[in-house]
Amino acid sequence: MDIEVLIAGAGPTGLTLAIELARRDVGVRVVEKAESHFAGSRGDGLQPRTLEVFEDLGVLDAVLAAGAPPFATKIYVGGQLVGERRMAEPVEPTPSVPYPNAWVLGQSQTEGILRDRLAELGVRVELGAGLVGFEQDDEGVTATLATGEVVRAEYLVGADGGKSLVRKSLGVAFEGTTDESIRMLLGDVQAEGLDRVYGHWFGAAENPMHGVVFTPLPGMPHFQFGAPLGDGEIDVETALPALQARVDEFSGEQRVRLHDLIWSTVWRPNIRLAARFREGRVFLAGDAAHVHPPTGGQGLNTGVQDAYNLGWKLADGSPGLLDSYEAERRAVAARVLGVSSELLQKYADGDEDAHKRGEETQQLDITYRGGPLAPAALGALRPGDRAPDAPLADANGKRVRLFELFAGPHATLLVFGDGPLDAPVGAVAYRVLPAGSTASGDELVDVDGHAFAAYSASRVLVRPDGYVWTITAG
């Protein structure tokens, strides 16, 4: 198979993009400089919109089976249990939002599920084959790998992290700051003596915001731990004995024994946004284009959304679609960086509600309104908005969801009531009839009225990535 797209980096962003391309029969290679797959939690919070993307990619069932809902956290101050809290109260699904709650799964496990899906499509990650250089011309990109191989591709995507070689080689500025005044000790470790049904925060008696937190990692015997570091903690040890001493300092009579440390690091807020997401035939995505504080769980999720936006556009290859990637995604990344930064500041200020999470972190409200693919319109639902889900019934009475109709590498035309089913080339068309109607053939009935209410339109064209392309009022 000819290589049309070369992806540098095999994290969640690169893997999502590769799946998007492979299922469209686009020749793709994924090269990774590491000699082995990453083992550890890092980005372990999956937001509702990412779960919707994963459903389309065919990995949601595996993600749900391997992960767990967010844990309630028991709060200890001075070694005494004083209560428990949640970042967000769980809510029930609705017809338009089937997955309203975040999900917890360690990044290495998410990557493993994505790799398995990619392998089903005939593509495997190439370890120890990182990109070491490239040149581009009007017709493609010539890339050199660490193995010495020279690869020719139509496009190159840098999904190679915050230290991206691709971004640096392009000379794209990485605008933002690294804040040395806020630091945190992070890692994964086993912790005997802690109930794995809960997270655990051990705070100092004189300063409850200073301490250490442990969050269970589903499918693993480990906890992710985090400890804010004070101004005087400069040369911080990250080895197991130092971590044990820190826990002993805060846990009081709650005896906790740490062992099997997988990784640990001192983290500093690196909040940056690439000045451009594209240079000719080279694109940036994920951490190569934007890096976030962990507050709000936005980094991994934003990278997945980058890939979901870019994949169908690369497969199509039309100049207008390719140009729209930067315009749409850079604006979203800037907004999301603002959300993460505001939450980080709350922690720095010691706000009591710093742990609270709301709709602003779920990424369901991301919109491309005003972008190059979103013509101006009126109404509650407009071009560029996320297309809502809704339950329908076919001619045999079998239930089917709009998201099931949207799934796959195609655009979708919904015609509500009468009107021609004249779908654009490559799109699939469906007629949706109001509740009480009798369907025949491929017609669908909005048995509960949710689809008509959510769309309030006569015709809607939904993009392959599940956003409204055009909408005609009903």
Image: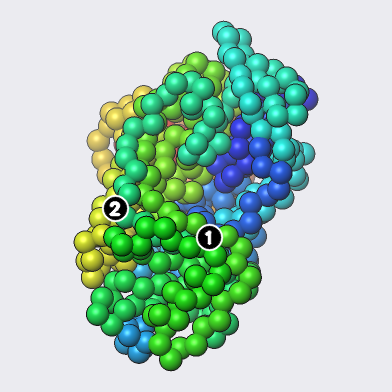
Query: Which residue is outermost to the top?
Result: 138
Of the pair 40 and 122, the residue shown nearer to us: 40
Question: If the image is split into quadrants, where does the N terminus sit?
Answer: top right
Q: Going 62% across and 31% down the picture, which residue do you hit?
A: 7
As drawn, is 335 to the left or to the right of 266?
left
Residue under the image location 34 percent in, 28 percent down:
371
Mark 1 in CB contact with mark 2 (< 8 angstroms): no
Q: Is residue 460 visible?
A: no
Q: Specify whether residue 353 is in view.
A: yes
Q: Give coordinates of residue 450: x percent, y percent.
A: 40, 56
Q: Nearer the viewer, residue 187 or 196?
A: 187
- Disc tally is 2
Residue 368 image offset from top left, x and y in percent? 35, 35
Q: Nearer the viewer, residue 29 or 379?
A: 29
Q: Mark 2 highlights which residue?
A: 181
Residue 37 in the image: above or below residue 45: above
The structure residue drawn at horizontal position 71% and vertical position 44%, both measured from the top left corner, is 35
Left or right, 348 with respect to 40, comes to left
Q: Is residue 278 above or below residue 19?
A: above
Q: Residue at x 37, y 58 (%)?
A: 234
Amino acid type indicated by mark 2: Ser
Could you tell me how far apart the alpha carbons at marks 1 and 2 are, in whole angstroms? 19 Å
Q: Residue 176, labelled with which disc? A: none
Instruction: Give the residue type that dot 1 points to.
Output: Ser
Q: Quadrant location of the C terminus?
A: top left
Label 1 crowd (10 A; few <14 / some 14-19 / many >=20): many
Residue 132 image position (x, y, % from top left): 63, 26
Residue identified by numbered label 1: 264
User: Circle 2 — which element?
Assistant: loop
Q: Residue 462: where, in percent of width, then height?
A: 46, 37
Relative placement, left or right, of 418 versus 65 is left
Within 10 Å of disc 2 (Cα), the crowding (few <14, some 14-19, many 20+) is: few
